[in-house]
Image: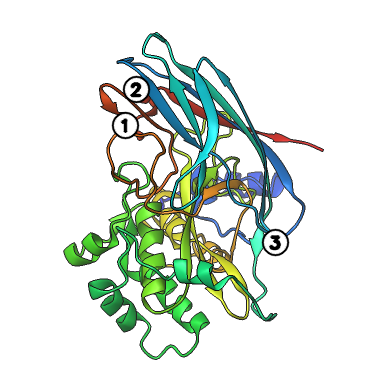
Amino acid sequence: MTTPRLSRRQLMAGACAAAATPWLTTPVQAQTAARTFAPQVGAWRTFEVTTTVQVASVKGATQLWLPVPDVDTDYQRSLDNSWTGNATRARLVADPVRGVRMLHAEFAATEAAPVLHLTSQVQTRNRAIDWQRTVAATEDPAVLQHNLAPTVLLPVDGIVRKTALDATRGARTDVDKVRALYGWVLANAHREPKTRGCGAGDIKAMLETGNLGGKCADLNALFVGMCRAVGVPARDVYGLRVAPSAFGYRELGGNSASLKGAQHCRAEVFLRQHGWVAMDPADVLKVMRQETPDWIKDTSHPLVAPVEKGLFGGWEGNWVAWNTVHDIVLPGASGSGTLPFLMYPQGENAGGRFDELAPDSFKYTISARELKA
């Protein structure tokens, strides 16, 4: 960025203004100035998330499937779900194989204007690992095995395993492997703003084509798949940003009043001396590409470095997790295919499956509000 030459009078005026209000910065300075990003585990926050669907094009009977918070951990408490509308039947159901819960609503073919309102209450808080503190972490062996297994779009052999082995050559411990893969994703992949939605997460195609651009469901899936390929249990966590970032990063928060496009996938790895640990290389790449008008390509940049450090082992609690599941079957849906993940509202009628990435034509809105104690 080129700094315009200022006259002596302009410099003096600027100096006086700065002396009078030392906190004042120009928009450009605000975008590039060093910031902190250091989430610390603290108090729980309670959010009420509301999804409203008004089907725009009615053709025969309609079905809707909406994700609900289905994660209960040390960083989230999924509290309650309630719904209203004109469905003939609406209930919480689960994928028959994976078990992930969702709200399933069915509308009669005679219903001219299907409407569904879902309200979910959830508590969240920040995550931050203390790398100096170790514990004898335990987890159900079946859960660990599940998070080492391939999925349709996350193979753990072939080019994925070869790339992961090359990236972790010389790494001795699981922590070393995860650090190496986190760094590899940041060095080799990039945020591509033109990708629709959050991306598809087809990591084999990404590696085979050499096109490592995408969004969170691509970039964090690449990290997760490579971790699995070298024997480190890992999983994607699909969810929604519900509030602005407390650290001033525009791209790391959501506009609570309108969360269209606020879906975000994060990642976790299981480390034997730490348990499940938060990760999010995709958000580091998002800050590098979109936080300022200029594409930052150096992770040591003062705007990026705190995020790179903070998202290796932590994340901010302004986000709600839906689930951690791949290859989902929607109960009652036509056809026998699976979804790679459930992060957006889903729907279908006699005209076929709705476009989940087109909320203005599918006709759904999502908003959130924080409930104060």
The residue pinned by badge 1 equals 355
The N terminus: image quadrant: bottom left
Asked if the residue under mark 3 is in contact with the one under mark 1, i.e. CB atoms within 8 Å, the reply is no
Asked if the residue under mark 2 is in contact with the one under mark 1, i.e. CB atoms within 8 Å, the reply is yes
Dot 3: within a 10 Å radius of its alpha carbon, few (fewer than 14), some, or many (20 or more) residues?
A: some
Residue 183 in picture, x, y percent from top left: 42, 73
Q: Nearer the viewer, residue 339 or 19?
A: 339
Please, which colouring scheme is shown?
rainbow
Give the distance between the C-alpha atoms of the residues marked 1 and 2, in whole angstroms. Answer: 8 Å
Judge whether 304 appears above or below 273 on screen: above
> What label sits on residue 40 in the rendered view?
3
The residue pinned by badge 2 equals 361
- Identify the secondary structure beneath mark 3: loop
- Identify the secondary structure beneath mark 2: helix
- Identify the secondary structure beneath mark 1: loop
Outermost residue toward the right? 373
